[in-house]
Amino acid sequence: PEPMACVAAFKKMLTAPEIAEKGYEVSLMALAHNGWDESTHMVSFYFKSAERYLEAGQTFAGSPAFAQFLAAGASVGVENRSETLTTHSIVKGDSRGTRSQVTWTIDVADPVTFVPAWQKMSDSFGQYPWAPKAYGLQTTLLGNQGWATHEVWAAFDTPVEALNFLEKFYLTPEFQEYDEVTGDAARLVRSYMANSIVVSNED
C-alpha cells in the first residue's frame, strides 16, 4: 500500500551488519501488467547452493533487522501473497545489469514436447535486434504446484526494450512453429513484467 516506505525499509534491512556481511544476491521489483494477481511487488533471492540457501534462512530468522522490516511492513498493510522455490533448468545470456523482466508462469503437461520446442524457439531470438539480454526456463520445486510447473523469463535493460520484444516475437515464424508443435503440452497461467527497484550483490 505504501511503496516508498516499503523500499526504504527494505534498503535499511539490507544494510544491517548481520545481513550485509553475508552478501546475499537479492532484488526488490515492482510488478506491472500482472492481470488478476493483486501483488504489487516481488522479492527475489538467488542462491548458488543449497548450503547458501540454508545459511540465509538461519541468518534472517535470527536477524533483529529482518524482524523490524517485517513489523514495519505489517504496520502499513503489507501482505505476503505467495512464496515459491524454483531452479534454473535452462539459462542463456547474461542478465546482470538488466532492470526489466517479463515472466510467463506456465503449467506444462508434456515436458518432452514442450522443452525442446521452447528451446528451439528461444534460441532463435539471437538473430533479431530486439532479442532479450538473457532468457531462461525455471522449474518450480515448491509453491503453487497445483497450478504452475515452470516459469519462462526474458530480461531487458529497460521496460521499453521489453515492450518492443513483446510486440515483435509473437509474430515470428519461430513462435508460430512453437505454438503449433506444443499444442496442449503447456498452458499459460499468468504473465507479468517486473521492474527492479533495489538490486543488491548482483553476481
Image: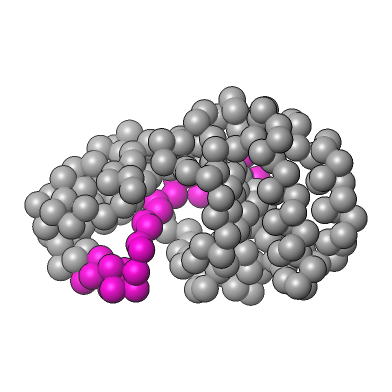
Q: Position of residue 151 (x, y in %)?
A: 60, 58
Q: Is residue 51 above or below residue 182?
A: below
- Residue at the outermost front position: 127
Residue farthest along the left direction in this orientation: 17
The residue at 82%/53% (across/down) is 178
In this view, the residue in front, 174 or 171, is 174
Image quadrant assignment for residue 90? bottom right
Taking 86 as reference, is 79 above or below it? above
Residue at left offset 25%, top offset 66%: 56
The stretch in magenta equals 33-58
Q: Position of residue 48 (x, y in %)?
A: 36, 63
Q: Is residue 45 left or right of residue 89?
A: left
Look at the image and tell me whether residue 142 can be seen: yes
User: Which residue occupies 45% across, 64% down?
Assistant: 83
Q: Is 131 left or right of 113, judged from the image as shown?
A: left
Where does residue 116 sit, x and y in percent of width and height?
74, 63
User: Residue at (19%, 66%) from the top-left corner?
Assistant: 59
The quadrant where residue 140 appears: bottom right
**Does residue 75 appear anywhere in the picture?**
no
Examine the structure image and report whether residue 17 is included in the region drawn in magenta: no
Image mark count: 0
Q: Quadrant of residue 3?
A: top left
Q: Measured from the top left, where is residue 141 in percent x and y?
A: 52, 73
Relative to 5, does residue 145 appear above or below in the rendering? Answer: below
